[in-house]
Each structure stands twice: as structure tokens, then as C-alpha cells.
Image (tube, rainbow, N blue to C red):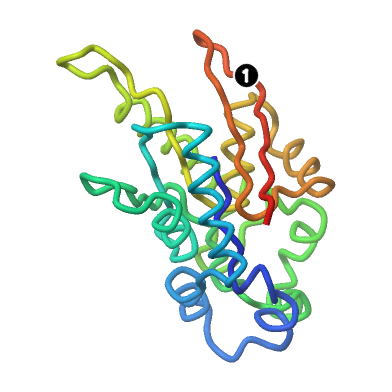
Amino acid sequence: MVRHAESIENADKYNGFYHDRRPYDGQAAHDISRTVVGLTPRGFHQAVWLGRTLAETVGAGARVYTSTYRRAIDTAQLAFPGLPGGWPRRTALLDEQHYGEATYMTKQELFATYPDGAEDRRLRKHLWTPPGGGESLAGGVRQRALGFLALLRTDTAPDSGSGARIAVVVAITHHTMILALRALLEARPVEEVVTESRETKIPNAAIIRYEMRGDAIIRPIIIAPSI
């Protein structure tokens, strides 16, 4: 699993996207988050670093998946230029958590507009369901993570000719999806993984590498970016 390289939102989150009251509605905010927010110059260099590092780590022949968000797509295209056959493959199963009407609202604006959800947002963020069509980490995001793992079981099934399985999969995605996938792969409660991430948040362009030995999944190695 790879967290997308640094985006303009990551770099200037509280001076830009969350500095003032949102001047547009939730749908416009979500569209901006998904289709407009791209990489910073640092993110560009991180993606190039990812390409070199993943080439050494996973070699050739990996199946590469990415979310449908621009920052993840750009990361994938820079890290894996020229892959044949429609790869990297885009799937909404790897998308960022959908924050609905809460997208790009300041906390003050959010709590004033939707006071009923304030306690969950403050104390139980993994259970919080954003208003206006959003999804919780423990609910909707986790369900999509399950869907992605099911997709992999189909896409990496033994080839009918050679009988060989695809050995390596790369998923370029977002922080919340990584938390959900980690909880599933490591058989841990989502809340535990979320609490751990508050102390050691996965940085942009980090690689979380899992290996399977038989039916067992080995606890991951985390490779942090050097840029």
C-alpha cells in the first residue's frame, strides 16, 4: 500500500482549505477534492522517488491500482509511467473517505451547522458519519476496503494457462483507506489502528509492505520517503 504523494491540500491545509468558512456547497467541495487537488512540487519528486523505490522493492509485473482522485492518479502515473494494458487501474474502492457536506468545512463551521454529530467527530472519529451522504471510517470506508480485497482475490487468481498467481499488488490510495486496509489485513480493530495513527501518522508517499507466507500475512514493513 502506498499513500499518495504530497498534495496541495496536505501542504497548506490550515492556511487554505480550512482557514475560512467554505464559500461553496458540499458537492462542489467534494468535486474539488476529487478532481482538482493535485501534487505539490515536493509531491512530484516523492512520486519519482516512489517509482525508483518500488522498482527495487517489487520488481516488474506488479498489478497497480489507484483511487479515482487526481492526487493518487498523478502519483501512480509518475511512479509507473508507461504500464501496458490499461494499468494502473482506477477503482473507487480505494477512494478517500467521503466527507459529504463536511468536506472542507472548518471545525467551527461544522459544529455550528451540524451540532448533533459533534461529539462523535471529537471523540470517536472512526465512527463519525459526516452529514449529507458521507461515510464513516468504520462503516463505509471499511466496506470498500473489504470490496478491494475481494477484487484482488479475483484479479490475482491463478492464470488459466500457466497456473501462476500474480505475486505483487500495489495500491496507491489515501490515509483513511490505508487505516481500514491495515485493520483488515492485520486483524485489528479499526479504533486501535486509528489511535496508533495519531501518534505515528503515515506520511505522504510512504510504502506499507505486506508479505504473505502461506495463508499468514506478515506484519508490515513501512518505508518512509527520503524526500
Look at 55% across and 55% down and name the residue there.
4
Q: Residues within 10 Å of mark 1 (few under 14, many from 20)?
A: few
Say which of 225 and 164 sits in front: 225
**Residue 106, percent across and down?**
72, 78
Q: Which residue lies furthest to the left in this view?
A: 161
Q: Which residue lies furthest to the top in this view?
A: 214
- Quadrant for the C terminus, please: bottom right
**Residue 205, percent across and down?**
60, 52
Say which of 115 and 196 sits in front: 196
Task: Quickly name the residue at label 1.
Answer: 218
55 left or right, relative to 4: left
**Residue 19, percent across and down?**
73, 84
- Quadrant for the N terminus, please: top right
Look at 66% across and 68% down and name the residue there.
10
Q: What residue type is labelled 1?
A: Ile
45 left or right, relative to 65: right
Locate residue 122: give its quadrant. bottom right
Q: Is residue 25 above or below residue 155?
A: below
Q: In this view, does 90 lie above or below 59?
A: below
